Amino acid sequence: MIVVIDGPAGSGKSSTAKAVAAKLQIQFLDSGALYRVATLIFLNADKDYQTFFDRLEESKISFHFKDGKFHAILNDQDVSDEIRSMEVSKHVSDVASNPDVRKYVNDLMREVVKSNVYIADGRDLGTAVFPDAALKFYMVADLETRAQRRYEEVRANGKNVTLEEVKQNITQRDDTDSNRSSDPLKQADDAILVDTSDMTFDEQVAFICQKIEQLISQQKT
Ligand code: DC
């Protein structure tokens, strides 16, 4: 079974999904992290698309959720912190716009989720990757709130950025993610809209948990 949360950058998808996974003892999949790993390969290939695709083919990307943290592994090396750099953030939307990169990441995700119960977050999971997901949420929040959240997250990781830089990055990424031709950021028709602008983190988590528990109890009857 898979539950998906899509939405723009900084709307609270990842942190909420992670907390829900820990609470319900299910697996968490951060699809954006996989696009970030691909972007790391792209940057290490000096932004040359031919070298990048050769290296992507040769690379082994895997992931796991352990002790409340999503770990992204590239060729046996944990790159979970490296993929959160501003350099990766600056290029990730362009790399993720490439249809071949999307196919690579989608194939990887579809294979892995076959064997467990997952909550995953992304941009196109409910519309394109898992159209038959058991439950779909679309999480939004106003730009100020989203920028402030991302800013605090990046600063907490010891990175030196300004709130204005984070806001610009989020605005640019939302624009690229929403307007790309290949599976853009979009609310699925059957997704539940969750506006987190005025919700506390605990309220977000409780809302999603309640919907999942409701579904599970309906399936039992
Ligand atoms: O969730 P995030 O901000 O770490 O995602 C990084 C980028 O990856 C985001 O700007 C767009 C892309 N992405 C995507 O295109 N499709 C997804 N399902 C998840 C992320």
Image (tube, rainbow, N blue to C red):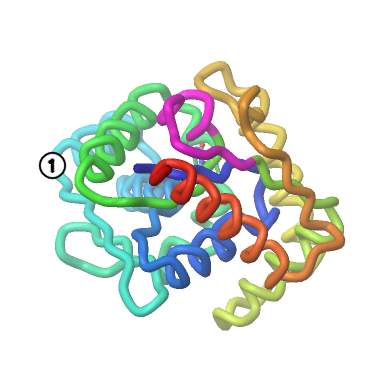
Please, which residue is most extreme toward the top here? 181
Q: Tell me what residue is drawn at x 60 percent, y 58 percent.
A: 210
Residue at 21%, 37% (x, y): give it: 111
Is residue 133 found inside the magenta-colored segment of the image?
Answer: yes
In the rendered view, tell whether residue 7 sits above or below residue 10: above
Q: Position of residue 25 (x, y in %)?
A: 37, 68
Residue nearest the observer in this picture, 214 or 65: 214
Q: Residue at x 30, y 40 (%)?
A: 109
16 or 1, nearer to the observer: 1
Say above or below: 105 vs 184.
below
Q: Amino acid at mark 1?
A: Glu
Residue 216: % across, % down: 44, 49
Instruction: Name the secondary structure under disc 1.
Output: helix
Q: Which residues are magenta?
A: 124-137
* Of 100 and 165, the residue lying toward us: 100
Residue at the image position 41 percent from the left and 47 percent from the top: 39
Task: Please tell me which residue lies in front, 135 or 113.
Answer: 135
Instruction: Say which residue label 1 marks.
Output: 58
Using the rendered view, name the quadrant where residue 15 is placed.
bottom right
